[in-house]
Amino acid sequence: MAKKKTSKKKPTINKRKGPSIGKEDKGVVPDGQKVLEGKEEKIAPIEKKMGLTKKEIKEEILKCGRNPTYFITNYVKISHPTRGLIPFKLYDYQKDVVKDLLDHRFNIVLKARQLGMSTTIAAYAAWMLLFHRNKEIMVVATKFETAANLTRKVKVIIKNVPSWIRIASIAIDNRTSFELSNGSQIKASSTSEDAGRSEALSLLIIDEAAFINGLDDMWKAIRPTIQRGGRCIANSSPGGVGNWFHKQWVAAEEGKNGFNPIKLMWNVHPEQDQAWFEKETKSMTRKAIAQELECSFLSSGETVFDPEDLTEMEQKTKEPLYKTGFDRNLWIWEEFDQEYSYLMSCDCARGDGQDYSVFHIFKLETMEIIAEYQGKVTPDLFANLINQTGREYGRCMVVVENATIGFAVLDKLVDLEYPSIYYSKKATHDYVDQYTAQLANNTVPGFTTSSKTRPLILAKMEEFIRHSIVKTYSRRLVNEMRTFVWNNGKPVAMRGYNDDLVMACAIGCWVKETALSENLQDLQYRRSFLGAIKKQTTTLADIPNLPISVDKTKHQQQKSAAETYQKYGWVLGIRKG
């Protein structure tokens, strides 16, 4: 009986071309084909247990070259802390990320912890190195050792790919870098401004980008290295607002910088449900939860003002009724009402630097900021604007921060005869009214901000914000408050940001609570004291229930005698009293 011939089932070949990764990278698959078709390249021996022919191996390699998800899911192994070397089976959200990395040149990943993003990116980098010629990848992270660790992950992946599919081997192997026989290489780099200079990168990986100091400057230096078709992956959990990662994420969401935003909350992982979340967060602080699980920029930072208060304030911001002034930077939400009193607090700048000249107008009865200016103007123009706006709001009191440029503004206001300038006693900050101050020698115009008063006025503003005493409609002010943080125990604006509006607001809160409140209280005491003083005109004859011994006639006689002395006392040499 003749043996029945059996044919081995060949693996299905995916003939669909994979998505391209940019004009300059066209031919991902052809590039892989060249590796196979080149006479100098030899396919590794077939693993007997696979039972594949050379043709089938070639088709499988091409399938991996076209589709990184297929390659990672079927052939990548990773090192597990307890289980050793295990296959890397991608979850659905990881597959979506890999597809985005393939489809977009620039990707920014905002993610929770424990989602395996660094490993996913390492697997994608291994795919790029293995199936492309002459690719150069650079990894930067919070520390050089962290970048080197990601590089080692890529090395482990490539070393553990089945030998028959590893079409390029490691030719040069260093501790923090390695190069393949096809000319592709990867290396870890420091986060200095010189990182990547004079190099043409195929892929830049920025790991934990929110926590890299000086990344703004490094990005300026390294950006040109990926302009000619290079790609970038910025991956991080949130680390507060105002840093490079936060700015790029905000711009990406607005479609302004070319980055494709990818947000991965803790619950994208199929094994993490609400019960897991509650168990995981039992011993975590609110900041740690926001940073590691909730992808919240605001709550994860060291902001001076409570994130929940800022969120509530942001919800109340609105467009002004008018944007006026010579530069349209005077925003007005409410016009003058003679039923209310107003206060203007000002912070001055030269007009040619990074800082702004600003002022707020408070409606004192409600502590609403109903007008605001922020602009870069010369001191004389700023003084003219203060004078004009202050008079429009009932000649309200003007408080000018009197450091350096502030004195020039105050001198100009005096020349303009502004009627209500804030004065205080030297070294005490006790308020003195303008007319008294002009006659005294121990007074100074404006408000003095020093190392002693700065923490006090900011603490007063924080108290007003926390108790919802002060109200603002300005998104400019709220944005400054978001980037006003603790740095070595001191409240300051983050690098590259301003605090002019914050400081002007703090001065206004302090003056309202201390100087004006104490002055009003003192005035009320004086009124009460004077009101209690009365002129007594009651005579004995008018007093009811007088004793019978008092003779009214005798009283009249005494009164007549007094009048006689008053009239003729000069005869006796008595002066008229």
Image: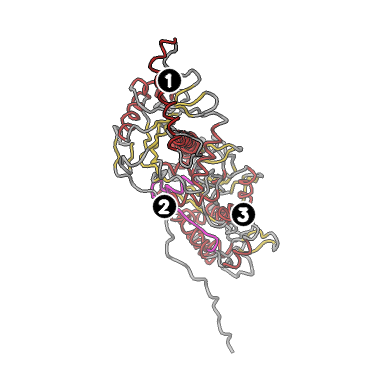
Q: Mark 3 belongs to which amino acid?
A: Thr
The answer to if 495 sits in the magenta stretch is: no
Mark 3, residues whose alpha carbon is within 10 Å: few (<14), some, or many (≥20)? few
In terms of sequence position, does the residue under pointer 2 or pointer 1 come before the other? 2
Find residue 315 and name its label: 2
Q: Is residue 317 visible?
A: yes
Q: Is residue 41 visible?
A: no
Q: Mark 1 belongs to which amino acid?
A: Gln
Scheme of image coloration: secondary structure
Q: Which residue is mark 1?
A: 438
Relative image position of residue 199 (x, y in whole percent): 51, 38
Q: Which residue is found at the position 63% from the left and 65% from the top?
A: 47
Q: Say whether residue 101 is left or right of residue 76.
A: left
Spatial separation of the CA atoms under disc 2 and disc 3: 25 Å
Mark 1, residues whose alpha carbon is within 10 Å: few (<14), some, or many (≥20)? some
Q: How many marks?
A: 3
Find residue 189 and name its label: none
* Highlighted magenta segment, given as a residue range: 243-268
